[in-house]
Amino acid sequence: MRKKRIIKRRKLDIMSQLTNYLMRKGKKNLAISIVNRTATEVEKSTSTPFLTILEGAIANVKPSLETKSRRRGASKQRIPVKVEERRALTLALR
Protein backbone atom coordinates (compact mmCIF):
# COMPACT_ATOMS: atom_id res chain seq x y z
CA MET A 1 0.00 0.00 0.00
CA ARG A 2 1.34 3.41 -0.98
CA LYS A 3 1.84 6.25 1.47
CA LYS A 4 -0.32 9.30 0.97
CA ARG A 5 1.67 12.37 0.02
CA ILE A 6 1.25 15.31 2.36
CA ILE A 7 2.21 17.88 -0.25
CA LYS A 8 1.19 17.52 -3.88
CA ARG A 9 3.87 18.05 -6.52
CA ARG A 10 2.47 21.19 -8.10
CA LYS A 11 0.43 22.55 -5.21
CA LEU A 12 2.73 25.34 -4.08
CA ASP A 13 5.41 27.17 -5.98
CA ILE A 14 7.79 27.40 -3.02
CA MET A 15 7.46 23.72 -2.20
CA SER A 16 7.98 22.65 -5.81
CA GLN A 17 11.08 24.83 -6.09
CA LEU A 18 12.40 23.41 -2.84
CA THR A 19 11.89 19.83 -3.97
CA ASN A 20 13.47 20.57 -7.35
CA TYR A 21 16.49 22.09 -5.63
CA LEU A 22 16.86 19.03 -3.38
CA MET A 23 16.48 16.61 -6.27
CA ARG A 24 19.62 14.77 -7.38
CA LYS A 25 19.87 12.63 -10.52
CA GLY A 26 16.17 12.96 -11.29
CA LYS A 27 14.94 11.30 -8.09
CA LYS A 28 11.98 13.55 -7.43
CA ASN A 29 10.07 11.09 -5.25
CA LEU A 30 13.02 10.93 -2.87
CA ALA A 31 13.19 14.73 -2.70
CA ILE A 32 9.44 14.92 -2.01
CA SER A 33 9.72 12.35 0.76
CA ILE A 34 12.61 14.28 2.35
CA VAL A 35 10.57 17.51 2.31
CA ASN A 36 7.50 15.73 3.71
CA ARG A 37 9.49 14.11 6.52
CA THR A 38 11.04 17.44 7.39
CA ALA A 39 7.62 19.11 7.34
CA THR A 40 6.12 16.58 9.73
CA GLU A 41 9.08 16.79 12.13
CA VAL A 42 8.98 20.59 12.16
CA GLU A 43 5.22 20.62 12.74
CA LYS A 44 5.57 18.13 15.61
CA SER A 45 8.32 20.07 17.35
CA THR A 46 6.95 23.59 16.89
CA SER A 47 3.17 23.00 16.59
CA THR A 48 2.95 25.61 13.81
CA PRO A 49 2.35 24.94 10.11
CA PHE A 50 5.46 24.14 8.10
CA LEU A 51 4.63 26.62 5.35
CA THR A 52 4.56 29.59 7.73
CA ILE A 53 7.96 28.62 9.13
CA LEU A 54 9.36 28.08 5.63
CA GLU A 55 7.99 31.41 4.37
CA GLY A 56 9.40 33.21 7.41
CA ALA A 57 12.82 31.63 6.91
CA ILE A 58 12.83 32.52 3.22
CA ALA A 59 11.74 36.08 4.01
CA ASN A 60 14.73 36.41 6.38
CA VAL A 61 17.17 35.13 3.77
CA LYS A 62 15.84 36.89 0.64
CA PRO A 63 18.16 39.58 -0.71
CA SER A 64 16.66 42.94 -1.57
CA LEU A 65 19.66 44.22 -3.58
CA GLU A 66 22.38 42.69 -5.69
CA THR A 67 25.27 44.29 -7.53
CA LYS A 68 25.70 44.19 -11.27
CA SER A 69 28.75 45.25 -13.23
CA ARG A 70 28.25 48.31 -15.39
CA ARG A 71 30.81 50.01 -17.51
CA ARG A 72 31.29 53.72 -16.98
CA GLY A 73 34.01 55.25 -19.04
CA ALA A 74 37.05 53.03 -19.04
CA SER A 75 36.32 51.22 -15.78
CA LYS A 76 33.75 48.77 -14.53
CA GLN A 77 31.71 49.66 -11.49
CA ARG A 78 29.47 47.54 -9.29
CA ILE A 79 26.03 49.14 -9.11
CA PRO A 80 23.33 47.99 -6.67
CA VAL A 81 20.12 46.86 -8.38
CA LYS A 82 16.81 45.76 -6.83
CA VAL A 83 16.21 42.03 -7.04
CA GLU A 84 12.94 40.82 -8.57
CA GLU A 85 10.74 38.63 -6.36
CA ARG A 86 11.24 35.47 -8.44
CA ARG A 87 15.03 35.82 -8.45
CA ALA A 88 15.09 36.64 -4.72
CA LEU A 89 13.20 33.40 -4.03
CA THR A 90 15.64 31.42 -6.17
CA LEU A 91 18.64 32.97 -4.41
CA ALA A 92 17.08 32.32 -1.01
CA LEU A 93 16.53 28.64 -1.76
CA ARG A 94 20.14 28.20 -2.78
Image (tube, rainbow, N blue to C red):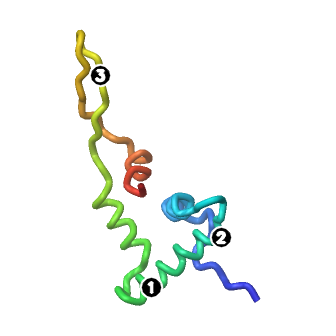
Q: Determine which residue is flagged by label 1.
A: 41
Q: Residue at x 44, y 85 (%)?
A: 41
Q: Which of the numbered marks, if any, corresponds to residue 70?
A: 3
Q: Residues within 10 Å of mark 3 (few under 14, many from 20)?
A: few
Q: Residues within 10 Å of mark 2 (few under 14, many from 20)?
A: few
Q: Secondary structure at mark 3?
A: strand
Q: Which x, y percent locates residue 59?
A: 32, 60
Q: Determine which residue is flagged by label 2.
A: 29
Total numbered labels: 3
**Tag 2: amino acid:** Asn
Q: Quadrant of residue 6?
A: bottom right
**Tag 1: amino acid:** Glu
Marks 1/3: CA distance? 46 Å
Q: Residue at x 42, y 45 (%)?
A: 87
Q: Residues within 10 Å of mark 1 (few under 14, many from 20)?
A: few
Mark 2 vs mark 1: which is more N-terminal?
2
Quadrant containing the C terminus is bottom left
Q: Residue reaching furthest front?
A: 25
Mark 1 vs mark 3: which is more N-terminal?
1
Mark 3 vs mark 2: which is more N-terminal?
2
**Tag 3: amino acid:** Arg
Q: Secondary structure at mark 1?
A: helix
Q: Which x, y percent locates residue 11?
A: 59, 65
Quadrant containing the N terminus is bottom right
Marks 3/2: CA distance? 43 Å
Q: Which x, y percent locates residue 50?
A: 43, 76
Q: Quadrant of residue 19?
A: bottom right
Q: Residue at x 65, y 70 (%)?
A: 29
Q: Nearer the viewer, residue 4 or 11?
A: 4
Q: Quadrant of residue 72?
A: top left
